[in-house]
Image (cartoon, helix red, strand yellow):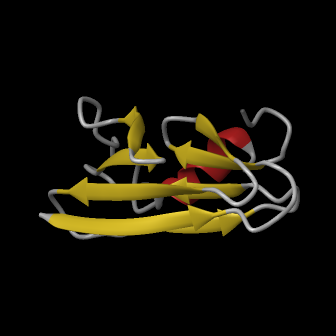
């Protein structure tokens, strides 16, 4: 079992969008705020983090992993009941989302 912890902070003056993939969940990180992420999976892997041109942050989970997102000590999103599926072939989750949806900020991407 592997666990990875990330903290997404917003030091800017405006809210920042955090996208959790492959679930397509969007969270808003307020100015001066943060969201703590705990990703856990039964197999080796790691989260991929992407900063998009519009200032959003996208975190891609690895196959079999789940994420619990906390904001101000409260759970705001929990995928423990729906682990990340495995993308086809040798694609990473980021590569798969880009292939299917065009990537963050592109047409067809949610």
Kindly indicate the quadrant of the structure image that contains residue 27: top right
The answer to whether any part of residue 62 appears in the image is: no
Q: Residue at x 78, y 61 (%)?
A: 52
Residue 82, x across and y down, in percent? 29, 31
In the image, 77 versus 11, the foreground residue is: 11
Q: Is residue 37 above or below residue 15?
A: below
Residue 19, x across and y down, in percent? 62, 46
In the image, 14 versus 19, the foreground residue is: 14
Image quarter where the N terminus lies is bottom left
Q: Is residue 63 left or right of residue 18?
A: left
The answer to whether any part of residue 53 appears in the image is: yes
Residue 58, x across and y down, in percent? 63, 55
**Number of on-image labels:** 0
Q: Is residue 95 left or right of residue 78?
A: right
Residue 7, x across and y down, in percent? 49, 66
Q: Is residue 15 above or below residue 38?
A: above
Q: Residue at x 56, y 35 (%)?
A: 25
Q: Is residue 27 above or below residue 51?
A: above
Image quarter where the C terminus lies is top right
In the image, 81 versus 5, the foreground residue is: 5
Q: Residue at x 82, y 64 (%)?
A: 12
């Amino acid at each position: 079992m592997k666990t990875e912890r990330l903290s997404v902070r917003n030091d800017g003056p405006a809210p920042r969008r955090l996208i959790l993939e492959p679930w397509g969940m969007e969270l808003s990180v307020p100015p001066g705020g943060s969201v703590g992420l705990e990703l856990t999976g039964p197999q080796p892997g790691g989260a991929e983090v992407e900063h998009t041109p519009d200032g959003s942050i996208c975190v891609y989970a690895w196959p079999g992993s789940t994420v619990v997102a906390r904001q101000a000590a409260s759970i705001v999103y929990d995928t423990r009941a729906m682990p990340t599926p495995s993308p086809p072939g040798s694609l990473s989750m980021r590569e798969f989302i880009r292939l299917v949806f065009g990537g963050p900020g592109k047409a067809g991407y949610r």
